[in-house]
Image: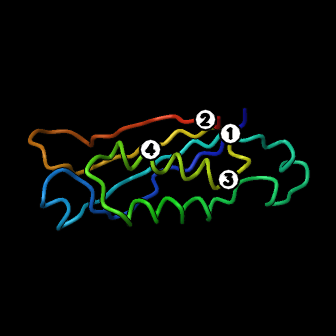
Amino acid sequence: MDKIYMNQLAFYGYHGVFAEEKKLGQRFIVDLVLQVELARAGTTDHLDDTINYGEVYEKVKEIVEGQSFRLVESVAERIANDLLNSFPLLQECTVKVIKPDPPIPGHYQSVAVELTRARK
């Protein structure tokens, strides 16, 4: 299956377990791998034969910057389900939600969750 990669989509959201996270918010980074048959789009050169990246970005933005979730797992699950429900050509998606600055002690670059969901 062919793949579309959308990397390092940056947003500001209010997700987390702690009150400060819901009040102050923080950065979230999202990586996507969208599995879709691209042969037709490659031949026809028509946007209708692929997935519109701008529409994907807006869907993800609505989720990350919209409703507050306690867990990034929930954010990732919502993104995957919404993308599969919104884009009929999408067969499978991998969603990685990265939290660069979680309020936990220690030295690290980030924490993240990644999940893969497929059309049923």
Q: Residue at x 63, y 59 (%)?
A: 53
* Cα–Cα span, label 4 and label 3: 16 Å
Judging by the rendered image, the residue that carries numbered circle 3 is 87
Amino acid carrying label 4: it is Glu
Amino acid carrying label 1: it is Gln
Checking the image for residue 77, the label placed there is 4
Proximity of marks 4 and 2: CB atoms separated by less than 8 Å: no
Q: Quadrant of residue 68?
A: bottom left
Amino acid carrying label 3: it is Phe
Residue 6 is situated, as x and y percent measured from the top left of the image, at: 56, 50
Sequence-wise first label, 3 or 2? 3
- 25 on left or right of 46: left
* Cα–Cα span, label 4 and label 1: 16 Å
Quarter of the figure with the N terminus = top right
- 69 on left or right of 59: left
Colour approach in the figure:
rainbow
* Cα–Cα span, label 4 and label 2: 12 Å
Which SS class for mark 3? loop
Q: Residue at x 33, y 64 (%)?
A: 12
Sequence-wise first label, 4 or 1? 4
Residue 86 is situated, as x and y percent measured from the top left of the image, at: 63, 56
Sequence-wise first label, 4 or 2? 4
Amino acid carrying label 2: it is Ala
